[in-house]
Image (cartoon, grey):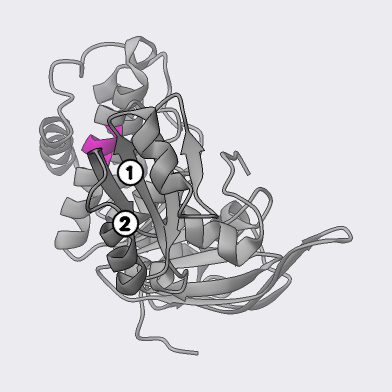
């Protein structure tokens, strides 16, 4: 097993009764990088995170985090990591500052060091004005930022983020993405599970797709997308006659008379050239090219479309 990575997983197996959730999972995450774990409902993403963060024991396999074996050196692992789970760990009856102070005490930070760290995180995560308010008054995005601040207070070398932006509005999601990027720039390693494929595309250096208890594909987002051939082109016409004329020459295209749009598959530059030749004399209002994205990859690899999940 490679011990030079921040996270190394080999032959990870876990079953709940007769249901095998993980069936020989292998993955490595280099230091200072983001690894996104994708998979359909019940694929074992959260189980993987729970085992790596010592919250659950594996049936078989080896897991090392920050250089420590999660079975034999669990305390050392816990001192090296931070975990932000699917559900917030904050106490809503305490203020933001009180939640952070509680974590500072749990991390055994002395008073001056703890206060300095709390003030820095409140400033960094834009929570200064809300620090004296009870957390129950916070918006969803503010609660998530406070949750992450509590994780960061211990200066972890490795962070596990289990669907950290579920339920957040687009602005809050982007804010959290920026915080993750800042942490990685400082050398922190992040293992991320997410129900948003665009999130993996935005943040991850490498992506692993879990299905049937195994990693069925792994690579950079660009590498995974390159495995899915082609894409499609949407052409919007100025009138129905122009749409019908071109649609008659492209047998497998899909036409929408309502939007005056024709959608055609393409499998590379040659097919795009043929399409453009057909459009030379047509009255075209707009044209857009869609390359394969992680949704296409997910469908191609697992045989079913990506679903929003809470597993």
Q: Residue at x 20, y 53 (%)?
A: 181
Q: Is residue 234 above or below residue 100?
A: below
- Check disc 2 and report the residue beneath it: 278
Q: Are marks 2 and 1 in contact (CB under 8 Å)?
A: no
Majority SS type along the magenta span:
helix
Residue 174 inside the magenta-drawn segment: yes
Q: Quadrant of residue 172?
A: top left
Say what secondary structure mark 2 lies in.
helix
Could you tell me how far apart the alpha carbons at marks 2 and 1 are, in whole angstroms? 12 Å
Dot 1, how many residues are within 10 Å of its Cα: few (below 14), some (14-19), or many (20+)?
A: many
Q: Residue at x 41, y 59 (%)?
A: 231
Q: Is residue 167 above or below residue 263?
A: above
Q: Position of residue 45 (x, y in %)?
A: 58, 56
Q: Quadrant of residue 211?
A: bottom right
Q: Residue furthest bottom?
A: 1
What range of the chain is rendered magenta? Answer: 172-176
Residue 42 inside the magenta-drawn segment: no
- Check disc 1 and report the residue beneath it: 235
Q: Earlier in the sequence, mark 2 or mark 1?
A: 1
209 vs 302, nearest the viewer: 302
Q: Residue furthest right?
A: 18
Q: In the shown orientation, is residue 60 left or right of residue 33?
A: right
Q: Residue at x 39, y 47 (%)?
A: 246
Q: Position of residue 190 (x, y in %)?
A: 34, 59
Say what secondary structure mark 1 lies in.
strand
Q: Quadrant of residue 23?
A: bottom right
Q: Residue at x 48, y 53 (%)?
A: 295
């Amino acid at each position: 097993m490679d011990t030079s990575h921040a996270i190394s997983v080999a032959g990870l197996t876990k079953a709940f009764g007769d249901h095998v959730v993980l069936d020989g999972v292998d993955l490595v995450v280099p230091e200072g990088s983001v690894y996104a774990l994708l998979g359909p409902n019940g694929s074992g993403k959260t189980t993987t995170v729970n085992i790596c963060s010592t919250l659950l024991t594996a049936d078989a396999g080896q897991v090392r985090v920050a250089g420590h074996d999660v079975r034999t050196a669990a305390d050392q692992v816990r001192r090296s990591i931070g975990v932000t789970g699917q559900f917030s760990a904050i106490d809503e009856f305490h203020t933001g500052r009180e939640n952070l102070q509680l974590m500072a005490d749990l991390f055994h930070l002395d008073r001056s060091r703890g206060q300095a760290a709390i003030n820095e995180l409140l400033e960094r995560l834009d929570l200064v004005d809300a620090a004296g308010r009870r957390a129950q008054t916070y918006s969803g995005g503010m609660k998530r930022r406070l949750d992450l601040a509590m994780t960061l207070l211990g200066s972890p070398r490795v962070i596990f983020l289990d669907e950290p932006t579920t339920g957040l509005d687009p602005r809050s999601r982007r804010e959290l993405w920026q915080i993750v990027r800042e942490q990685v720039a400082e050398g922190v390693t992040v293992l991320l599970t997410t129900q948003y494929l665009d999130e993996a595309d935005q943040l991850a250096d490498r992506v692993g797709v879990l299905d049937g208890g195994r990693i069925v594909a792994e690579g950079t987002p660009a590498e995974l997308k390159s495995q899915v051939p082609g894409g499609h082109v949407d052409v919007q016409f100025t009138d129905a006659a122009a749409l019908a004329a071109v649609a008659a020459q492209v047998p497998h295209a899909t036409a929408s008379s309502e939007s005056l749009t024709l959608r055609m598959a393409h499998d590379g530059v040659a097919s795009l050239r043929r399409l453009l030749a057909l459009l030379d004399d047509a009255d075209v209002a707009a044209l857009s090219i869609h390359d394969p994205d992680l949704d296409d990859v997910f469908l191609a690899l697992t045989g079913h479309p990506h679903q929003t999940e809470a597993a």
